[in-house]
Image (tube, helix red, strand yellow):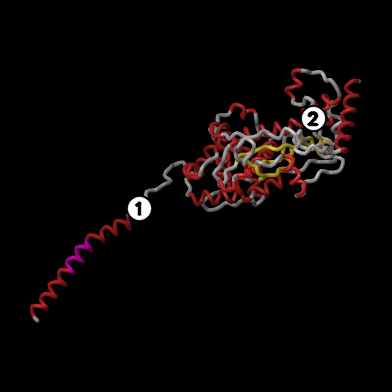
Amino acid sequence: MDSWEEEVRRFMLEEEEEDDELFFVLVPALQLGMYDEKEPEHTSILTGPKYVKEVLEGHERWCKVDFRMESEIFRAIVHLLRVENLLRDTRGVMIEEQFAMFMFMLSHNASTERLKKRFQHSGETRHRKITEFFDIIPALTHKFLKLPDVYQTHVKIASDPRYMPFFQNCIGAIDGTHIPITIAEEKAPPYRNRKGTLSQNVMCTCDFDLKFTFISCGWEGSASDAGVLRSARNKGFNVPVGKFYLVDAGYANTPSFIAPYRGVRYHLSEFRRHRSYANYKELFNHRHAQLRNHIERAFGVLKKRFPILKVGTFHPIENQIKIPAAVAAFHNIIRGYNGDEGWLDHQPNNIDPSDYVELPEGDDEYPNEVESIDGNTLRDQIAHQMWAAYNN
């Protein structure tokens, strides 16, 4: 019995010694893990607020490159966002930095990692602030995309005998444009356009000051321009009686949407080679093209300022759909403050042009050949009056 008890005591002693050895090995390791600090990720001395301050107070070109506008316009928009209570300052991110973050994202198609590095914020903060900005886009478009004044002929028409009185009831121009989209493969087929790439078909109207007055986003790239317009009308886009927009051959000719004569030269480049007109249809088409060119010029300026409209993006589909509306609103605000556009022609690329997506330029002809008799009658009346005045 004694020997058995001694054996048990010896065994327990050995176990305790092994436990002690394990304790002395594990505890220091655990303590090291507890007190070992993580390596800081945001170590730049140029924090978000300092970076924004440096850009706004630096050379005027800096703000144009990174935020796509002059510094005084940047500050004016921040003031607007603040007084309209569209955004709020938070302890960590003032509205100046929130706006800068959103504009930098638009200007560079910046990824989460790039925004984290540039503004020295966590991914969670960046995501929250960009999402909050996307949430106010409907309010911005409602405020800054206004339908034109239908009671007064625009001065560019009223003061030009080429257009007055023939287009006195014209209130703007309409066109569609394709914007690249990124979406899961199983949802992609409707967004595949005739170029084989993925896009949304965006319909816009503009006035003769090159400001956008209406936008409809989110239609699949396979949709026709006429189909997008038809949907917009079903959802409340109306044209006052007696007024009309100018459209291209991809739309039906109606009293509300006047299209050019088909089968007759139309594009401005064709008239540069031959200045004379063979008949009233050619004259009408030239004048029509000169006025409708405003929508093409507006799109041109928009895509130069915001080349994100030429590439796929990193955002959820619901936010991708809002990007064209966002940049249209900022375009109008910048034009309202007489922002410079000449520098856009000599601007280095913030986004690699090799990333640009090949896209359709628009529908060449209306998919339904049934014409509007009333629309054709109105167009003929305008064209004949114009021809008579031209010959006199």
Magenta span of residues: 15-24
The quadrant in which residue 324 appears is top right
Name the foreground residue: 111 vs 196. 196
Q: Nearer the viewer, mark 2 or mark 1?
A: 2
Q: Which residue is identified by label 1?
A: 37
Q: In the rendered structure, does residue 52 fall within the stretch colored magenta?
A: no
In which quadrant is the N terminus drawn? Answer: bottom left
Q: Residues within 10 Å of mark 1 (few under 14, many from 20)?
A: few
Is residue 126 in view from this perspective?
yes
Q: Residue at x 64, y 36 (%)?
A: 194
Amino acid at dot 2: Arg
Say left or right for 56 vs 141. Answer: left
Circle 2 sits in a helix, a strand or a loop, which is it? loop
**Secondary structure predominantly adopted by residues drawn in magenta:** helix
Amino acid at dot 1: Glu
Say left or right for 150 vs 203. Answer: right
Q: Position of residue 101 (x, y in %)?
A: 55, 44
Q: Residue at x 37, y 48 (%)?
A: 39
